[in-house]
Amino acid sequence: MDISRTDLLRPATLRDATAIQRRIADLVDPRDSAAAPSRAAGLDVSANIRAADAVIHAAAVVLDWPSLALAATGGASEPAPFPYVPGYLGFREAPALAAAIASLPAEVRPDLLFVDGQGWAHPRRCGIACQIGVALDLPAIGVAKSILVGEIAGTLGPAPGDAARLVWKGETVAVALRTRARANPLFISVGHRVSLDGAVAHVRAALRGYRLPEPTRLAHLAANVRRRGG
DNA sequence: GCGACAG
DNA sequence: ATCTTGTCGC
C-alpha cells in the first residue's frame, strides 16, 4: 500500500547515507504493533559474486501467519546501486527488496517482515531491517546470521531455544538465539514496530527444525532460484 | 594507526 | 554474498 518513503533508501553518497540512517533510527518504533500479524514475508537477495555485473535479485516469500502456509512469492531484480559496505547494507539491498514486496498482489501483502540482516544491532541502530520497516511502515524483524557489533553476554547454551543477550556499549541490542543444535546462533533484533521480546517470539514461532525461520529460509531459496533460473 | 566488519 | 561433493559427527 504505502510504498511511500522509499526515498529513504536511495542516498547519493555515503555521507548522505549516514545522515539518513540517523533520521531513520529516530523513527524506529521498538514497540509491538497493535494488531497480530496475518501474513509474514521473508526477504532475501542473491547476487553474483562478480562485482562487474552486480545485480541484486530479491525475493519476498509470503506465508500465512501463524500457519506458515505459502501464500505468495514476489521478486525483483535491479542493478546494485551501492557496493557492499559494512554498516550500509540496506542501501545496497533494500531498494530491490522493496520492489519485490511491491510486486505482490495487494491481497497478500505481508504485515510482518523477516529481514536477512541486523535491525537495531547496528552502529547507528539502523540496520537493514530498520530501513525497510520504516521506509514501508511495516513491522520488521532483523534476522542476522553473524554479528556486526556487540558481544554475547555470558554463555549461550547449546540446546535449541537457548538464548543470550547481545550487548553493545552497555545496551542490549539483540538476542542471540540458538535455533538448532550444533549450529551457530541467529541474532534477532528490532527492525520496526516490534519489541525485542516480540521479535524473538515471532522467530521462535516460525522455526521448523532448520537453523533459519521459515520466511527467511524460503526467501533465501527463492532468491537463488530467481538469480540462477528455475 | 590498527583491527573489525550484517550480506 | 558465492564457489561445491563428500564426509565426519551428533
Image (tube, coloured by chain):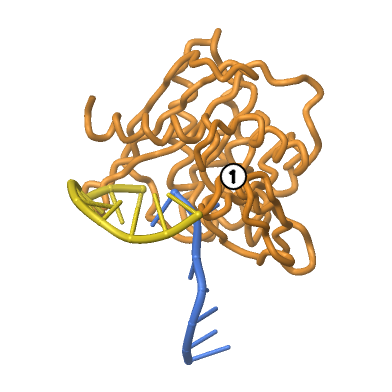
Chain colours: A orange, B blue, C yellow
Residue A12 placed where, x, y %? 46, 51
Q: Quadrant of residue A66?
A: top right
- Looking at the image, can residue A52 be seen? no
Residue A51 placed where, x, y %? 26, 54
Q: Residue at x 68, y 51 (%)?
A: A120
Residue A111 placed where, x, y %? 64, 22
Q: Quadrant of residue A223?
A: top left
Identify the element where label 1 is drawn.
loop
Residue type of the residue flagged with mark 1: Thr
Q: Which residue is mark 1?
A: A179
Residue A35 placed where, x, y %? 78, 19
Q: Nearer the viewer, residue A66 or A114?
A: A66
Q: Quadrant of the C terminus of chain A?
A: top left
Relative to A197, is A66 on the left or the right? Answer: left
Q: Residue at x 51, y 21 (%)?
A: A62
Q: Nearer the viewer, residue A27 or C6?
A: C6
Q: Nearer the viewer, residue A189 or A55?
A: A189
Residue density around tag 1, few if under 14, some if 14–19, many if 20 or more, within 10 Å: many
